[in-house]
Amino acid sequence: MFQLTDAILERIIFAMEDQSKKLLIDLETGDVIDKTTIENEDSPELYSEMAQRFVEPPSWDSRRGFSILEAFASTVTSPTDIKMELNAALRRGKGVFKQFRQVLSKDQDIFKRYQEFKLAAMRPIVERWLEALQEGEKLTALKEEPEDLRDIIASDIDFIVSSLDGIVFKLESYINYCIEESFGSLPIAIKMRSLSDLLELVKTDSNSVHIAMGTIDGVSPLIAGLFSLQAYKGSPICVVHGVFGTKESLMLDLEWPIIECISEYCTKIGATQILLEGPFFSSLLCDSALEYGFSQSGTIFHKNL
């Protein structure tokens, strides 16, 4: 049986996605052939031999294909016009795959990253299929999504801490966008007052305010946590004022990794406690805070470092 190289993996994926369902995989070489090559064979002996050598590719459907598009789009932060076009393509319905590829073709770097992401997502499925063939078993239809998509995404994400002077995107615009998209259910009075207080803090005390980011390109955030360091009895206390992300980034489960990134940074500089203070934390994050070692006093979560 062939060794699964990237080139052979790409051929198998091509056969998996072929809507005609007429393609078979050569188990000796990893090449793709048309079913008619076997169906037109007159010799029963040769037909039987070919039927063992040429097999159906792993099963695949558009729902699983769409989940890969959706997961990849959630990692795209820039250029902003490409991000917007990818999200628009996902909402298109009919023709979504063609439209998504057309948008990707506008940026070669993003297109290359998508190709690598897709191969990584589908490789485990093909590997399981090969293992089943080697063991003489029939691979049952896959019921789960392409596995470990979030792990694949996470492997590309760096979590970094920066001063506000070290970022190149417009912080106020980013926070406003995330609040409107992810905290739309907050009462308008609470949302506007809390946002005003946060922006005033950024403006008047920028030296104490830092930002933690989950980023793929090192520039644009998939998710961000804004926090300040406040002196108390000679040691700093870390106050996290909010975790901000888009609806797409929330599916990546990056909220606690960003809190952990902040905690690790603050521990290194000698902070004794971390507080989550304010309304700009998702209900999911608040609901699970106690499981992550935080205690609750009123609306504030706190933890010793």
Image: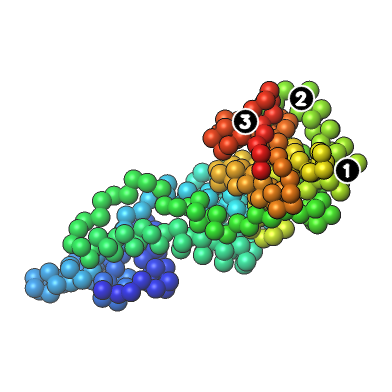
Q: Secondary structure at mark 2?
A: helix
* Mark 3: few/some/many CA within 10 Å (<14, 14-19, 20+): some
Q: Position of residue 203 (x, y in %)?
A: 89, 42
Q: Which mark is residue 219?
A: none
What residue did someone put label 2 on?
A: 190
Q: Quadrant of residue 167?
A: bottom right
- How many marks can you see? 3
Front position among marks 1 and 3 = 3
Front position among marks 2 and 3 = 3
What residue did someone put label 3 on?
A: 295
Tell me the distance, in whole angstroms, between the alpha carbons under discs 2 and 1.
Answer: 22 Å
Q: Earlier in the sequence, mark 2 or mark 3?
A: 2
Q: Residue at x 61, y 62 (%)?
A: 110
- In the picture provided, is 54 more to the left or to the right than 267? left
Disc 3 marks a residue whose amino acid type is Ser
What residue did someone put label 1 on?
A: 205
Q: Position of residue 8 (x, y in %)?
A: 38, 72
Tell me the distance, in whole angstroms, between the alpha carbons under discs 2 and 3.
Answer: 23 Å
Is residue 212 among the parts visible in the rendering? Answer: no
Can you name the residue that lies furthest to the left here? 44
Can you name the residue that lies furthest to the right here? 204
Q: Position of residue 249 (x, y in %)?
A: 61, 45
Q: Nearer the viewer, residue 205 or 42?
A: 205
Q: Nearer the viewer, residue 215 or 95?
A: 215
- In the picture provided, is 157 more to the left or to the right than 202? left
